[in-house]
Image (cartoon, rainbow, N blue to C red):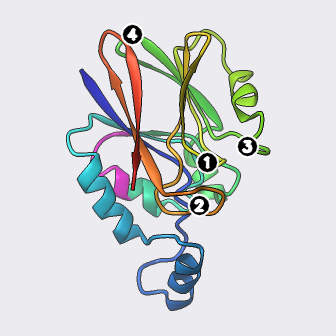
Amino acid sequence: MMKIGVLSDTHLTAPAGNFLGNVTQKIRNKLTLEDLRAIVAEHFRGVELIIHAGDFVETAVADMLRTFAPLEAVHGNMDIAEVERAFPAARVLEIGGFKIGVTHGDGAPQGIIERVSAKFAGVDAIVFGHSHQPVNERRDGVLFFNPGSPTDRIFAPYNSLGLLEIGDAISGQIIRL
């Protein structure tokens, strides 16, 4: 059984020690990069891969995640140009005999599953973000998985991230923080 850590919408912009940035993050109920490092260390213990579905905002999050496991990612609508150059807007990963589409998503939360579904054909799962609202559901045999945001509670009732497990099947778990 392969375990994959999944997160999205980390929205971390302020370097540690930047007072104004840290205050802004706390106002939006956002955590810092060091807070995220502790969360990843706790919940992604033993993962073989990490998937990030965009809106890193800056590359520091990607650099930190790579210290835990290999990283596959896409960029989101809030990412700076450096992140956009590093990661595509959408991709398909083949893992353990399963095809996993990864994209950030766009628009209102209503209809986001239909919009991300239109980007991929013949996949077993679609990992997406954007709405900050956790999703773990199957439609027509496809797993739709949005881990929510571990750092930013805007538009979401709680912070979360996720795990995918791949064996004979692919399944997801949302972890409420």
Residue 113 lies, in percent from the top left, at 69, 29
Marks 4 and 1, Cα distance to the nearest angstrom?
28 Å
SS at circle 4: loop
Residue 128 belongs to the span the image colors magenta: no
Nearer to the camera, 49 or 118: 118
Quarter of the image with the C terminus is: bottom left
Q: Name the residue under label 4.
A: 97
Q: What stretch is highlighted in magenta?
A: 64-71
Residue 46 relative to residue 17: left or right: left
SS at circle 3: loop
Q: Residue 109 carries which label?
A: 3
Q: Residue at x 59, y 60 (%)?
A: 57
Q: Which residue is drawn at 36% across and 52% down?
A: 65
Q: Which mark is residue 85?
A: 1
Residue 104 relative to residue 52: left or right: right
Q: Tell which circle, 3 or 2, labels the residue nearer the N-terminal end.
A: 2
Marks 2 and 4, Cα distance to the nearest angstrom?
31 Å
